[in-house]
Every structure is written in structure tokens, then in C-alpha cells.
């Protein structure tokens, strides 16, 4: 049984990203401990690049915001699933702030061994996810993580546009996590 954290990046509650993440969590919850956290609810400030975390006791960030909670959760996570809408070929600003704040020595204390990705975008372009996938692959390699899998959904702009087959794919991916 794995401890799975599903980190969602959509500021739109109960939209396509949240629905896909919930479907994943339902599948993963069959055999694992699953928690969902919304980056939009954490109020994480952007990294200032001050690098004070490298010299501070416990490598704590100088900023006191929602990231402190997420650092604690990541210290107890075996599998991290990131779910985001695609905005201008990137992840949401809320999620990007979290990713940038992982430029901290605390990241070395996380037991994460697998990383997964759920993306949903309005466009149908074949290259819609390319920029994010390059970053994702680099992160997998840098941290020596196993790819837990991906669900990539195109053509879902408005709430409810995500199809049942996409929700099923997210559920099946969740079931596959051990």
C-alpha cells in the first residue's frame, strides 16, 4: 500500500481537472491511502530565489504560507500525482508556484518514488502538452523517479466537458498504482 498525494492545480472548483483527479483518487483508493490537496487552496507565494532555505535551520523557507503544509505532506508521500489544466502550454500559476518552491533542500527529505501526471486542456492541438511533458521528463530524471503514468485530455474547455472515457482512464491509472 502506497501513500499517494494528488496535488491539483486548478483554481476552478469541481471542473474538469478536479473531476479527473477525483476519478484517479477513487481508483487509487481501492488499495492505497490517498489524499487530495488543491494548490489553489494553499495560497503559495512564488519563490523569491533568496536561497535562505539552504542555510536556515530545518531548511525552512523564509515565507510563511501554505507551502509549509505541503512540505509536511510531501515528507509522507510515496507517490505524487500532479493534476492541472493547461494554460498557454503550461501548468496553472497556482501549481507552478508550488513547483518553483520545491527548489529547496527539503525536497531531499521526501520519500517520493513515483510521479504521475493528469493534464486537461481546451485545445485539440497535437502539441498541446509538449512543453509540460518535457519538464515532467526532466523532473523524473533529475529526481530518479518512476513514471506512475499519465492521463492527457484534449478538448475539455467548459465544466463537464471531460468525457466518461477520460474519467475511466484516470480511474484505471489510479487502480494501477501500488
Image (spheres, grey):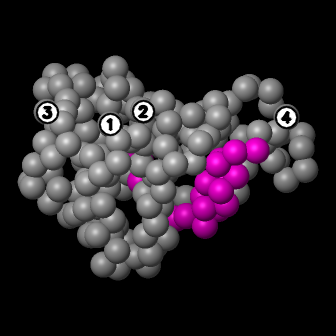
In this image, 40 relative to 156: left or right? right
The nearer-to-camera label among 4 and 3 is 3
Disc 4 to disc 1: CB gap under 8 Å:
no
Q: Secondary structure at mark 2?
A: loop
Which of the marked residues, 2 or 3, is nearer the chain's N terminus? 2
Q: Secondary structure at mark 3?
A: loop
Give the position of the N terminus as an image quadrant.
Answer: bottom left
Looking at the image, which residue is at 30% across and 61% down?
22
Few, some or many residues within 10 Å of mark 4 (<14, 14–19, 20+): some
Q: Are marks 1 and 2 in contact (CB under 8 Å)?
A: yes
Residue in view at x 29 percent, y 69 percent: 26
Q: CA distance from mark 2 to mark 4?
A: 26 Å
Point out the stretch of residues depicted in magenta: 64-83
User: In 3D space, how far apart are the residues under numbered discs 2 and 3 (Cα atoms)?
Assistant: 17 Å
Can you tell which mark lies on residue 155? 3
* Mark pair 1, 3: CA separation: 11 Å
Return the residue nearer the eye: 145 or 99. Answer: 99
Mark nearest the camera among 4 and 1 is: 1
Report the residue marked by disc 2.
Answer: 92
Residue on which the image places disc 4 = 52
Closer to the chain start, of discs 4 and 1, is 4
Between residue 101 and residue 136, name the one nearer to us. 101
**Is residue 80 highlighted in magenta?**
yes
Give the residue number, with chain letter if any, for mark 1: 85
Looking at the image, which is closer to me, 40 or 57? 40
Amino acid at each position: 500500500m502506497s501513500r499517494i498525494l494528488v496535488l491539483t492545480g486548478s483554481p476552478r472548483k469541481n471542473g474538469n481537472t478536479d473531476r479527473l483527479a477525483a476519478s484517479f483518487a477513487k481508483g487509487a483508493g481501492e488499495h492505497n491511502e490517498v489524499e487530495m490537496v488543491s494548490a489553489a487552496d494553499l495560497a503559495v507565494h512564488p519563490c523569491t530565489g533568496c536561497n535562505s532555505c539552504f542555510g536556515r535551520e530545518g531548511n525552512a523557507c523564509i515565507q510563511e504560507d501554505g507551502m509549509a503544509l505541503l512540505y509536511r505532506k510531501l515528507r509522507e508521500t510515496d507517490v505524487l500525482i500532479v493534476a492541472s489544466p493547461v494554460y498557454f502550454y503550461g501548468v496553472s500559476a497556482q501549481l507552478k508556484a508550488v513547483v518553483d518552491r520545491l527548489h529547496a533542500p527539503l525536497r531531499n527529505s521526501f520519500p517520493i518514488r513515483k510521479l504521475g501526471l493528469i493534464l486537461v486542456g481546451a485545445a485539440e492541438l497535437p502539441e498541446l502538452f509538449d512543453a509540460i511533458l518535457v519538464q515532467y521528463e526532466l523532473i523524473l530524471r533529475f529526481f530518479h523517479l518512476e513514471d506512475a503514468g499519465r492521463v492527457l485530455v484534449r478538448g475539455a474547455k467548459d465544466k463537464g466537458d471531460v468525457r466518461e472515457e477520460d474519467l475511466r482512464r484516470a480511474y484505471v491509472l489510479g487502480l494501477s498504482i501500488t
